[in-house]
Amino acid sequence: QVQLVESGGGLVQPGGSLRVSCAPSGSVFSINTMGWYRQAPGKERDLVATITPGGSTNYADSVKGRFTISRDNTKNTVYLQMNSLKPEDTALYYCKMDIWSRLTSRYLERWGQGTLVTVSS
């Protein structure tokens, strides 16, 4: 079973920038929508941003103008560039991909294990 591997989390000061990335651990046939979600301590997991294969994007209001989602279809990789980070952006960030399953002939959701982003001085 394909697993998603995230990287790039860490500690950053308020106002700083960070980029996280995510890619499948093995080969895949096709990936539909890719996205990033986050879960802060004691809160539910919320949408951050999504991107379609054609490049259409959707963002949570709280990150619009600060975060940018992008994808490299040749590498099956999704990125999240985070600028002007705030302490309230501190959370575990998860990537999600809809990956084609030859077994079921449909796209199945796959989640990464999460990468921690901490914004603190």
Image (cartoon, helix red, strand yellow):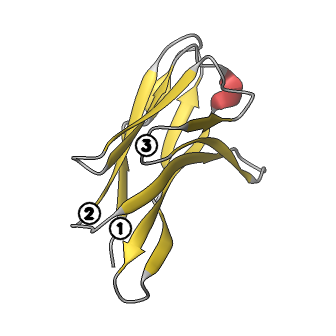
Q: Amino acid at mark 2?
A: Ser
Q: Measuring from the top left, give residue 50's x and y in whole percent.
A: 56, 44
Position of 96 relative to 39 (above/below) = below
Q: Measuring from the top left, give residue 114's x and y in whole percent.
A: 49, 53
> Which of 107 and 90 lies nearest the eye of the viewer?
107
Q: What residue is at 22 percent from the left and 67 percent from the top?
A: 26
Considering the numbered disc 3 on the image, is that residue within a helix, a strand or a loop? loop
**Mark 2–mark 1 contact, CB under 8 Å?**
yes
Position of 28 relative to 56 (above/below) = below
Residue marked by disc 2? 25
Q: Which is in the foreground here, disc 3 or disc 2?
A: 3
Q: Earlier in the sequence, mark 3 or mark 1?
A: 1
User: Quarter of the image holding residue 48?
Assistant: top right
Q: Earlier in the sequence, mark 2 or mark 1?
A: 1
Residue marked by disc 1? 3
Query: Crowding at label 2, few (<14), some or many (≥20) Cα neighbours within 10 Å?
Result: few
As drawn, the label of residue 54 is 3
Work out how far the residue at label 3 is from the one at label 2, CA to CA, in angstroms.
23 Å
Work out how far the residue at label 3 is from the one at label 1, CA to CA, in angstroms.
23 Å
